[in-house]
Image: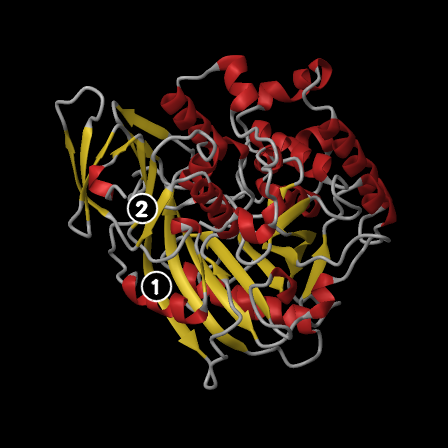
């Protein structure tokens, strides 16, 4: 058998993040010589999912607040009696996937969807603090269909008419007549447009902005209408009562592993715990690169596709907290539509200016909490996971702690709030837009985009990389890119045995 250094590799892929893994999936039936390496011992890179022990080790590695990479300022704290380390799969960057997402279309056309179990994402809530009439904080469910609006008892009749008018507008916002209304305001904040054109009050504006999952709460009219349209259009596609799904066992890390395993079945060679230390260009016109690996091996390759290890200066930084909660909070995962599946995840938003940190600073940006039940496979039965995030500021960590305490209080009603048995805090840097940089035989995927819902344009660099490698474009590319027939052997155990 030829050694790795004796093989002329058509492509070397570095990193098993989402984009590299989807690229590997796209090449899985190409018959090319593919070597896929990753300096880490796990799949998923920036989208990885960890057990508690792995999360602790990862946090120690990324503890420095001045680290130059994607992650920094990581810290783990546990309760007096820490949970058993088994049965956890904590996602570094959880993202829900709308039913109308192009990612799901590609997973279906490539037949990779057969190896992923999806769970329903349930209601979106807004946190409401104590008032004179309500002595405990509450979670207000956001109506996201016209039927929801009609049945709501929390929205006055006149406001319902305005909201129904907006929902009708969004369903047809790309038509010529509706475009005449919003295009003059395309770059303005969506909240202003909702107020001026539809007379929506502050509460209803916050409902709409929450559905966009905008990180800074200042999404533009053009982008906001597109996101709301996708959300509403996704409602009911896979079943009543939900618009989005979440991959079981760790979110997008599962998609990464499925892509890599499919490539392995196609003949790709995988080496975890092996990074690239140096890349030198050769004079050979066909085999252009000498790639030195961290195991002291040098391999020859025609092309190298890799992920970025840094984020752009104009990118975004999120403060994140992942908390393991000692009880299941079942009241958060109730079905609200007859015949709908029990949701495994819900979203809670804390609008900007609603949360105060320990230093008295109010939240400058929205805070989002994605609460996952044990049905996601991320924690044992009887517990749940809360993923909190907000744009990083000097007080963001304290704000996330306050938001978590407030959420648990609201979810518990008059009962004692449950214990946080494990907490992982860190900052993650990312790009505002996906990108791809091609320098002759070396192609680099840009830093990940940190939106809380998967963006379709994250697939564009993958398609561009595939076209760069295969030379296919246009209709031919449309017909072949991630479009596969079922394999002759479709037994689950056989398909992914490499």
Which residue appears farthest toward the left when viewing the image? 283
In the depicted view, which residue is nearer to us: 196 or 251?
251
- Sequence order check: which comes first, mark 1 or mark 2? 2
| Residue of label 2 | 37
The reply, left or right, for residue 497 in relation to residue 36 is right
Between 20 and 394, the residue placed more toward the observer is: 20
Q: Which mark is residue 290?
A: none
Please tell me how crowded label 1 is: few (under 14), some (14-19), or many (20+) other residues with Cα within 10 Å: some
Q: Position of residue 155 (x, y in %)?
A: 80, 49
Q: Secondary structure at mark 1?
A: helix
What colouring method underlies this structural image? secondary structure
Residue, disc 1: 58
Mark 1–mark 2 distance (CA, rounded to whole Å): 19 Å
Q: Quadrant of the N terminus?
A: top left
Q: Is residue 168 above or below residue 2?
A: above
Q: Residue at x 30, y 67 (%)?
A: 60
Instruction: State the image coordinates of residue 214 (x, y, percent, origin top left).
Output: 54, 42
The reply to whether residue 352 is in sight is no
Q: Position of residue 158 (x, y in %)?
A: 84, 40
Residue name at image x 25 percent, y 26 percent: 441
Q: Residue furthest bottom?
A: 80
Q: Quadrant of residue 302?
A: top left
The residue under the point 69% across, 48% down is 203
Closer to the camera in the image, 310 or 90? 90
Image-quadrant location for residue 13:
top left
Task: Name the secondary structure under disc 2.
Answer: strand
């Amino acid at each position: 058998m030829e050694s790795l250094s004796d093989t002329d590799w058509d492509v070397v892929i570095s990193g098993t993040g989402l984009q590299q893994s989807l690229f590997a999936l796209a090449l899985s039936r190409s018959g090319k010589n593919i070597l896929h390496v990753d300096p880490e011992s796990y799949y998923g890179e920036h989208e990885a999912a960890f057990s508690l022990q792995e999360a602790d080790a990862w946090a120690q590695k990324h503890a420095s607040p001045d680290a130059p990479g994607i992650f920094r300022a990581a810290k783990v704290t546990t309760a007096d009696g820490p949970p058993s380390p088994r049965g956890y799969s904590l996602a570094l960057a959880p993202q829900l996937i709308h039913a109308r997402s192009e990612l799901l279309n590609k997973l279906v056309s490539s037949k990779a969807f057969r190896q992923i179990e999806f769970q329903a994402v349930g209601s979106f809530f807004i946190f409401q603090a104590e008032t004179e009439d309500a002595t405990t904080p509450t979670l207000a469910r956001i109506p996201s269909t016209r039927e929801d609006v009609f049945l709501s008892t929390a929205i006055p009749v006149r406001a319902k008419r305005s909201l129904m008018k907006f929902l009708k507008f969004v369903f047809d916002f790309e038509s010529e007549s509706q475009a005449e209304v919003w295009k003059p305001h395309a770059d303005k904040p969506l909240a202003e447009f909702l107020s001026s054109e539809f007379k929506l009050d502050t509460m209803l504006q916050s409902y709409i902005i929450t559905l966009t999952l905008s990180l800074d709460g200042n999404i533009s009219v053009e982008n906001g209408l597109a996101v709301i349209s996708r959300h509403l259009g996704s409602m009911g596609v896979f079943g009543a009562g939900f618009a989005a799904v979440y991959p079981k066992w760790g979110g997008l890390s599962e998609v990464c592993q499925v892509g890599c395993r499919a490539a392995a079945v196609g003949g790709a060679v995988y080496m975890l715990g092996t990074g690239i230390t140096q890349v030198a260009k050769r004079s050979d016109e066909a085999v252009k690169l000498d790639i030195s690996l961290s195991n002291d091996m040098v391999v020859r390759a025609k092309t190298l596709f890799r992920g970025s290890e840094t984020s752009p200066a104009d990118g975004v930084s999120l403060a994140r907290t992942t908390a393991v909660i000692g009880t299941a909070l079942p009241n958060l995962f109730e079905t609200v539509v007859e015949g709908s599946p029990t949701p495994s995840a819900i979203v809670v938003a804390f609008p900007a200016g609603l949360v105060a940190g320990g230093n008295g600073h109010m939240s400058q940006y929205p805070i989002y909490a994605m609460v996952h039940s044990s049905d996601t496979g991320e924690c044992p039965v009887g517990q749940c996971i809360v993923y909190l995030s907000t744009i990083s500021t000097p007080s963001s960590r304290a704000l996330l702690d306050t938001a978590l305490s407030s959420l648990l209080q609201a979810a518990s009603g008059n009962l004692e709030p449950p214990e946080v048995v494990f907490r992982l805090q860190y900052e993650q840097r990312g790009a505002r837009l996906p990108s791809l940089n091609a320098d002759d035989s070396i192609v680099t995927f840009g830093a990940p985009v940190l939106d809380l819902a998967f963006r379709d344009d994250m697939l564009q660099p993958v398609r561009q990389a595939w076209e760069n490698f295969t030379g296919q474009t246009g209709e031919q590319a449309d017909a072949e890119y991630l479009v596969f027939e079922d394999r002759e052997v479709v037994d689950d155990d056989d398909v992914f045995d490499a």
